[in-house]
């Protein structure tokens, strides 16, 4: 079926959630950028625009970050007509035809389609960390010996610990943890923006298809996490926070989230080239790194 001549890219809306999530799930997406919750919650940061048309999801990013360009059209059919639509849109709007958030396969496909037109770039800090859900849920073998010790110490010191899924009764507790996390951090614009995104996520959790949970010790909320199932292949952990005096609860909330999520892999997103964050993510032994490529005009 011929695609329409116009591409109505617009800011993601809550009412787009079901259709976008259904298409992404059918395509087996695993990238954190494919979670509708991220498209919606981070649209201000990246000036995200999307369109659903002809069985394809189109995305364009133009924020004040290195994330700029069109994403590869996502759908189950032949992508060639959809790519032609992006060319038409770029020409009609005076927008450079360039791409971001590409998998290695998508980047190779585009370079074959447009030989000599683009130069490829990739940043290690943009790669998603994907872990086998069973590894995070069970912490097996010698590789996870230290993690098991941390958990054993926490549960020994706090034998009354609990984990409760996100629900109407626990959302205020998750918000309290997020407030305490921000109060104990340096309030940079980035962290304040993240806190506001957490608030929106909790407010619209059902419309955004979000799940998660809160960990308790002594009856007090000490840690929270918010996630979404991107596809049967992967779930994405959007936010994971502990109250400042309860940082030793991170291994617990990590494990309990892995136990509840119905997926093969858990995406714990990128490390942004932050050394401490990279060390923490590597300590859980990712099964793979999902690199994100960009193609810029030569």
Image: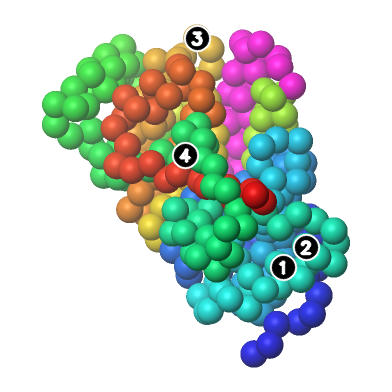
Is any part of residue 112 visible from this angle? yes
Question: Disc 4 marks which residue?
Answer: 127
**Which label lies toward us, 4 or 3?**
4
Q: Which residue is mark 1?
A: 87
Number of the front mark, 3 or 2? 2
Asked which quadrant contains residue 86, the reply is bottom right
Task: Give the label, 4 or 1, closer to the camera.
Answer: 1
Q: Label 1 to label 2, Cα distance in Å?
A: 5 Å
**Residues at marks 4 and 3, CA–CA distance in whole angstroms:** 30 Å
Image marks 1 and 2: residues in contact by CB distance under 8 Å: yes
Counting other residues with Cα less than 10 Å from the Cα at mark 1, is it few (<14), some (14-19), or many (20 or more)? Answer: some
Give the vertical position of 107 relative to 193 (above or below): below
Q: CA distance from mark 4 to mark 1?
A: 27 Å
Q: Earlier in the sequence, mark 4 or mark 3?
A: 4
Closest to the observer, 130 or 146: 130
The answer to whether residue 32 is visible is no
The residue wearing badge 2 is: 90
Q: Magenta region: which residues?
A: 167-189
Q: Are marks 4 and 3 in contact (CB under 8 Å)?
A: no
Gap in Å between the C-alphas at discs 3 and 2?
A: 50 Å
Label 4 sits on a secondary structure element that is loop
Q: Residue at x 51, y 35 (%)?
A: 123
């Amino acid at each position: 079926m011929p695609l329409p001549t116009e591409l109505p890219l617009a800011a993601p809306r809550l009412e787009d959630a079901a259709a976008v999530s259904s298409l992404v799930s059918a395509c087996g997406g695993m990238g954190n950028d494919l979670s509708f919750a991220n498209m919606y919650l981070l649209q201000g940061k990246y000036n995200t625009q999307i369109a659903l048309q002809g069985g394809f999801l189109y995305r364009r990013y133009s924020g004040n970050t290195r994330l700029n360009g069109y994403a590869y059209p996502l759908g189950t059919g032949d992508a060639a007509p959809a790519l032609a639509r992006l060319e038409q849109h770029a020409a009609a709007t005076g927008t450079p035809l360039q791409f971001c958030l590409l998998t290695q396969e998508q980047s190779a496909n585009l370079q074959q389609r447009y030989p000599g037109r683009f130069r490829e770039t990739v940043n290690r800090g943009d790669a998603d960390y994907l872990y086998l859900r069973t590894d995070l849920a069970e912490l097996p073998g010698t590789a996870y010996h230290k993690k098991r010790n941390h958990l054993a110490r926490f549960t020994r010191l706090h034998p009354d610990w609990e984990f409760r899924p996100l629900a109407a009764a626990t959302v205020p507790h998750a918000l309290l943890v997020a407030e305490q996390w921000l109060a104990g951090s340096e309030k940079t614009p980035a962290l304040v923006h993240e806190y506001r995104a957490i608030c929106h996520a909790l407010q619209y959790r059902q419309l955004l298809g979000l799940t998660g949970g809160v960990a308790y010790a002594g009856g007090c909320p000490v840690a929270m996490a918010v996630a979404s199932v991107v596809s049967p292949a992967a779930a994405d952990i959007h936010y994971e926070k502990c109250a400042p005096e309860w940082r030793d609860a991170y291994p617990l909330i990590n494990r309990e989230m892995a136990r509840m999520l119905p997926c093969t892999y858990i995406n714990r997103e990128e490390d942004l080239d932050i050394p401490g964050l990279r060390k923490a993510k590597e300590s859980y032994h990712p099964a793979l790194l999902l690199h994100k490529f960009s193609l810029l005009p030569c």
